[in-house]
Amino acid sequence: MKSYHLHQTWSRVWMKTIFILVSVIVVFPFIIMVLTALKSNQEISQGLSAFFPETPLFSNFVTAMQKGNWGRYFINTIIITGFAVIISLVINSLAGYAFARMRFAGKTILFYCAMVGMMLPMQVIMIPVFLQIKELPLVGGNDFFGNGGIGLVNNYAGVILPLIAHPFGVFLCRQFFMGFPKELDEAAKIDGCSPLQIYLKLYIPMGIPIFATLGLLKFVDTWNQYTWPLLVFNDPEMNTVQLALNAFKGENVTEWNYLMAATIVIILPILVLFVCLQRYFVQGIATTGMKD
């Protein structure tokens, strides 16, 4: 009995040690980022010999925000992210609800066809999608055949539209809604509710955890988008916060302290949102089953 308790004690010690090491590995890059943001250029050039700043320069944050029209950059990013998250939640939840609770011909085949999209990274379809938004008929000076104009290039919609729906969001919503008892739907139908009313009155109020989870994932993904906005926008005034970081990168010199300071400011909204939605995020992930 004593050896069993000793074995359990050592197991806990090893597990805690592993967790601490993993936590240090994960947090260490963020520590480096914060320390770099507080250093002078001279201290950065010294490398590890000046690991901690002799005098923390909090003024680097102010200087970084003065290099460029950051108010405009944040507005651009907020508009793109806000619309992408809201529209994505509506489309993905409606599709997930239909696949989970409604009966129609070809439902299983359509669902698996949608899931095929999870195998295609954005980088693979980026050029075809760009050509589609550029040659969209009757938009941005284009004629009926999509010629003569720029379509949705340099337009918020050009960035938002390809991001609003994703098979992973449909999958998450479907799996979450399948965990609801069928008696709820039957009772609502007896009360005279249509499928849309059931979705609005039952599934939205009870689906807050999955909405928070999907909203947070979509927010992080859209907020951190770099390649797609870089392809769609060629007007500096349309830059997002991720594109604006290029201002600190020169041909020969990179202003690392200002770059890290601006990066910290950019990730603050993500950290705040995660802290606020953490409870719902964990609940949404935990209650999303793997039912077929």
Image (cartoon, rainbow, N blue to C red):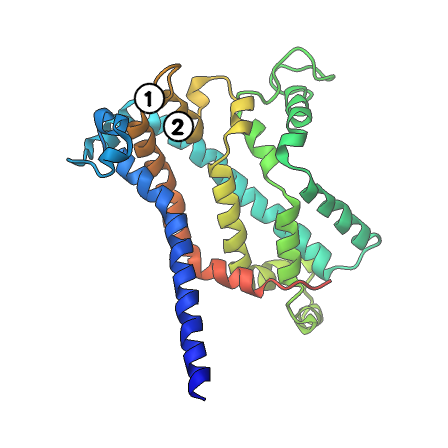
Left or right of 187, for residue 277? left
Quadrant of the rendering where the C terminus is positioned: bottom right
Residue beneath disc 1:
68
Contact flag, marks 2 and 1 (Cβ < 8 Å): yes
Q: Looking at the image, is 226 positioned above or below residue 113?
A: above
Q: Amino acid at mark 2?
A: Tyr
Residue beneath disc 2:
73
Q: Which of the two residues, 258 or 5, is positioned nearer the viewer here?
A: 5
Quadrant of the rendering where the N terminus is positioned: bottom left
Residue 238 % position (x, y): 45, 23
Mark 1 element type: loop
Residue 20 % position (x, y): 38, 58
Image point (62%, 61%), residue name: 176
Q: Residue furthest top?
A: 148
Q: CA distance from mark 2 to mark 1?
A: 9 Å
Image point (24%, 34%), residue name: 49
